[in-house]
């Protein structure tokens, strides 16, 4: 949900009919600010944030966080982190943990 994902206030995921979002955010300023800004856009476009969870930097296993996202039944899981944390969060998605594929991760 970065500015590049939006055009003139419209976000591609919302325009594509995705309405519910769950955040997996890094527990520091970057993750907090990404979640806050993305949530503002989601709510302004009549979407819904159905939940969130924070993780420490350098988390090697995101299985429990991905299961929480799956249980929320959100259309999209938003990763508000970077670097190795993003890699560690996405890899289990491809192997069947949390979601059937990474298609629902933004």
Image: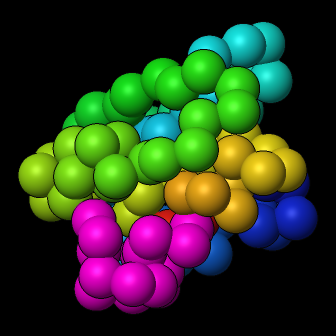
Relative horizontal placement of residue 7, taking residue 98 as reference (left or right): right
* Residue 45 x, y percent position in the rendering: 48, 50
- Magenta-drawn stretch contains 97: yes
Relative horizontal placement of residue 37, taking residue 50 as reference (left or right): right
Q: In this orientation, which residue lies closer to the viewer: 67 or 79?
A: 67
Residue that appears at 48% across and 23% down: 54
Q: In this orientation, which residue lies closer to the viewer: 90 or 50?
A: 90
Screen quadrant of the N terminus: bottom right
Q: Residue 3, located in which quarter of the rendered image? A: bottom right
Relative horizontal placement of residue 37, taking residue 68 as reference (left or right): right
Q: Is residue 11 visible?
A: yes
Screen quadrant of the C terminus: bottom right
Q: Is residue 37 above or below residue 94?
A: above
Q: In this orientation, which residue lies closer to the viewer: 63 or 81?
A: 63
* Residue 22 x, y percent position in the rendering: 36, 45
Magenta residues (range): 90-104
* Residue 2 x, y percent position in the rendering: 79, 53
- Magenta-drawn stretch contains 29: no
Residue that appears at 42% across and 57% down: 77
Residue that appears at 48% across and 40% down: 24
Residue that appears at 72% across and 13% down: 28
Q: Residue 32, located in which quarter of the rendered image? A: top right
Q: Is residue 96 above or below residue 67?
A: below
Q: Residue 33, located in which quarter of the rendered image? A: top right
């Amino acid at each position: 949900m970065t500015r590049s994902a939006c055009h003139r206030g419209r976000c591609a995921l919302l325009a594509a009919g995705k309405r519910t979002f769950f955040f997996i955010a890094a527990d520091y300023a970057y993750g907090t600010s990404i979640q806050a800004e993305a949530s503002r856009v989601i709510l302004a476009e009549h979407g819904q944030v159905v939940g969130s969870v924070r993780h420490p930097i350098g988390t090697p296993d995101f299985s429990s966080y991905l299961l929480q996202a799956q249980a929320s039944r959100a259309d999209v899981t938003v990763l508000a982190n970077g670097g190795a944390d993003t890699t560690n969060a996405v890899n289990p998605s491809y192997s069947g943990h949390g979601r059937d594929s990474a298609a629902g991760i933004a």
